[in-house]
Image (cartoon, rainbow, N blue to C red):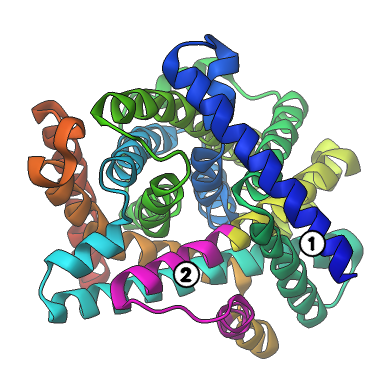
Amino acid sequence: MSHTNSLAVDRAQVAEQRTVSAARDAISGKVKGFRALLPFLGPAFIASIAYIDPGNFATNIQSGARFGYKMLWIIVLANLMAMLLQNMSAKLGIATGKSLPEICRENFPKWLTIIMWIVSELAAMATDLAEFLGATLALNLLASIPMLLATIITGVVTYLILMLEKYGFRPLEKFIAAFAVLIGLCYLVETIFSKPNIAQIAYHSVVPWLGNSESLILAVGVLGATVMPHAIYLHSSLTQGRIVPRNDKEKIKIQKFSTKEIFIAMTLAGFINLSMMYMAASVFNTTGNSQIADIQSAYHTLTPLLGPAAASVFLISLLASGLSSSVVGTMAGQVIMQGFVGFTIPVWIRRLVTMLPTVIIVAIGVDPTRTLVISQVVLSMVLPFPIIALIYFTQKKEFMGVLTNKRTTTIASSLFALIILGLNVWLVVQTFLS
């Protein structure tokens, strides 16, 4: 068995060297077009999974069912934010060869680093909660597996997927990218089934609307579910040692390839999020089912409205989302701990510890979808920390060199940070008054 394992590792190393060699050919200009982009595909697809996790299912379905197409603009705004921030995060890793948490530890006071670490770990726990619950719910509804057993199965499967990391960066990247494409295909099918109103989608994707305090909570939840704190930390780590630039010219070229990949991966994630919400708007809001507030009800209501095939496709997408995003969440947790405090714990221990909140929630019978929405609001509250740190470092030439942010990038990202902070303050005030 060990000999077989050694052969597999050797093959993976050869494949990884082939990817790096192909990337070098692309950088030198020997290969052009889409073939040149291929060896750079991977990091953004891993990060994009965080933007289509089960927390998105919960907030998008609730928003679409309750308010129809009116909140689509929040997804468009959040996706534009995500593209810019993920690009900045990837750029930081390429420019410095370090992750955002590592740079924070080296340059911020120790007390601030510890606070950021604790807050980031809380965000990672909230993230893992959403991801675990999503996969658990999908297994429960798809195969009638008891919730507690489904939680354990999810934990074991995600741990096995994480073991692909020992075979280098490429196998895991391909596996996660395949999950992202599968989720996209599922929602392409759901779009055909649900027959949404294209004119309403076009209008509400660009015209802002905020109604009452309930819609505000969901809007902040959508932001928290879409622009993920742990993905911002993770992306800087995914690019730092993948294809290492040998000079400034290579840094610029690698960054250009990275930007193209981010555009492709985040556009796919944006389409999936939009389709989640407009599917709920088309199927639930327009048929008198606007009070659909949880994933179970959505599944059971989809069956008579669109048929068992549509309901099954919905659950397959949820399962793929839960499993893949749980893997990505664990990877981010390792990056956060290693970066902020300089040590790591074995993956199986982190996997076990982050499972516990989900096991407890399932065991005591707390409403899973409500928990999902609240977890996304928590994420939105935490989001300013990595965004402010990212803006601070990427606009400094001593860190970024030739990849220092342009002034327009700094202004745009600062504006996004202010929007998120403003929505969070408004949410706290509305909650206190109500």
Nearest to viewer (mark 2 / mark 1): 1
Q: Quadrant of the N terminus?
A: bottom right
Dominant SS of magenta comes to helix
Amino acid type, mark 2: Gln
Dot 2 or dot 1: first in sequence order is 1
Tell me the SS state at disc 1. Answer: helix
Q: Tell me the amino acid under the disc marked 1.
A: Ser
Residue 281 in picture, x, y percent from top left = 58, 37
Quarter holding the C terminus is bottom left
When asked about the image quadrant of residue 78, the answer is: top left
Q: Could you tell me residue 316's position as x and y percent?
A: 79, 48
Left or right, residue 407 beside residue 182? left
Which residue is more in the foreground, 358 or 3?
A: 3
* Numbered range of the magenta stretch: 328-357
Q: CA distance from mark 2 to mark 1?
A: 25 Å
Whether residue 336 is visible: yes
User: Residue 163 in the image: x percent, y percent?
Assistant: 70, 64
Residue in view at x 45 percent, y 32 percent: 262
Q: Nearer the viewer, residue 18 or 418?
A: 18
What's the residue at 75%, 66% (across, down)? 160
Residue 334's disc number: 2
Residue behind mark 1: 6
Q: Identify the residue at horizontal 87%, vertical 65% (top origin).
A: 3
Q: Is residue 174 visible?
A: no
